Image (tube, grey):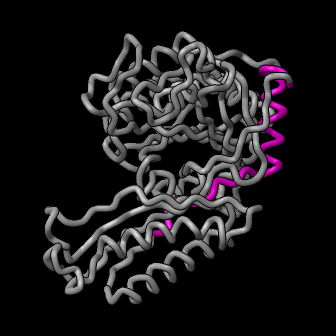
Amino acid sequence: MEQSKASLQHIIKWRRHLHTNPELSHQEYKSADYIYNILEKFPNLSLERPTPTSVVATLKGAKKGQTIALRADIDALPILEEADVDFKSLNDGVMHACGHDAHPAMLLGAVEVLCSQVDTIAGTVKFIFQHAEEVSPSGASQLVAAGVLDDVSYIFGFHVTPNQPTGNLGLHIGAANAACDDFTLTIQGRGAHASSPENAVDPILIGADIISSLHHIVSRSISAFNQAVITVGEFRSGNASNIIPDTAFMQGTIRTTDKATRILAREKVETLIHHIATMHGATYTLDYIFGTDIVYNDADATEIARNAAIKVVGASRIYESLQLMGAEDFSAYTELDHIKGSFIRLGTGLAVDGYGYSPHHPKFKIDENALETGANTAIQIVLDLLT
């Protein structure tokens, strides 16, 4: 059927309000209220708050059919904004630096169109405005636990992507985002004066040995055909130049794109730490946490997204998106056996035009003209599946 178009003017208005008023994960009370109040003005929707800072709007078509979902995340980051825009964050030290203002604005644009087409829809659409994508426990896992996805057969999400032409759409079948696991390690050695290191079990030396050895796991224990990244982001110990401390602390992440490599990486990290600490006569406490799962784009769902995208922007503006080692809690949905999902990249401008800063950068910004494409593609997906 002929598609009605989303209002870019409305999308930009909603996006700029959210951008100006960012809230951290699990604190999105005002953002959720703002979204809820907009949705209340649209016809044919039933609204619920599965958690205090999320909103789900359900549109039931005039005819029976399957249930599909569109998801947008709404939380911001603890970043002081430096972007060159006229609508900077009014919440000092908090910024929408990952597009979680654009995503709900696009979804609202799609809702605004679709809620007036209830007579043509055969099935149900759930519009999920999800909290807390950036942290663990994640908002997606909480919504799954709350039963929001129990009756959903397909789910789609979008993410703004810098350094891609405005409005281009990126698709990828298979692992789209890596799993991300965390570890914290405390090494218990024995302190001594710097002049007599023979009396110490030096946790700094042990920690340095562990860090150096951890980075050999990827190159020597994991196949070159599989992807993995191990990063130690914090290492601290001691507070004086002439004292060997008795403890050291480090924490890091392990990112993988297949389940077997994920298990292997954990085994190697645990074994390596045990042997190095024991060899030096230290004890340790290791906390290894399985975090965000792999985002897996289903082939069927991705083909549905591709066909919709072709109708909206044409085949020449669709690109094969790269597999990313960054984590994304959309994985909590694609991990469910009964759901086919696809996570779609939306190009939001090139560096030459000022849109080259990566997500989580204090100067991150987007070309808002792309948002109309995102909303219209979401609309087309629904129409293709349910009309």
Q: In which quarter of the view is residue 149 placed?
A: bottom right
Q: Residue at x 74, y 62 (%)?
A: 224
Residue 387 seen: no
Residue 178 in the image: state x and y as whole percent. Answer: 61, 55
Range covered by the magenta-colored residues: 289-315
Count of labels in the image: 0
Q: Residue at x 41, y 14 (%)?
A: 84
Q: Nearer the viewer, residue 246 or 111?
A: 246
Q: Is residue 150 above or below residue 209?
A: above
Residue 264 in the image: state x and y as whole percent. Answer: 62, 75
Q: In which quarter of the view is residue 70 placed?
A: top right
379 sits left or right of 272 in the view: right
Q: Is residue 170 above or below residue 179?
A: above
Q: Nearer the viewer, residue 17 or 189?
A: 189
In the rendered image, residue 312 lying in the magenta stretch gets the answer: yes
Q: Residue at x 31, y 77 (%)?
A: 187
Residue 65 in the image: state x and y as whole percent. Answer: 76, 45
Residue 42 in the image: state x and y as whole percent. Answer: 52, 23
In the rendered image, residue 217 lying in the magenta stretch gets the answer: no
85 sits left or right of 221 in the view: left
Residue 120 seen: yes
Q: Quadrant of the N terminus?
A: top right
Q: Quadrant of the C terminus?
A: top right
Q: Is residue 141 above or below residue 176?
A: below
265 sits left or right of 275 in the view: right
Q: Residue at x 50, y 34 (%)?
A: 359
Q: In which quarter of the view is residue 281 placed?
A: bottom left
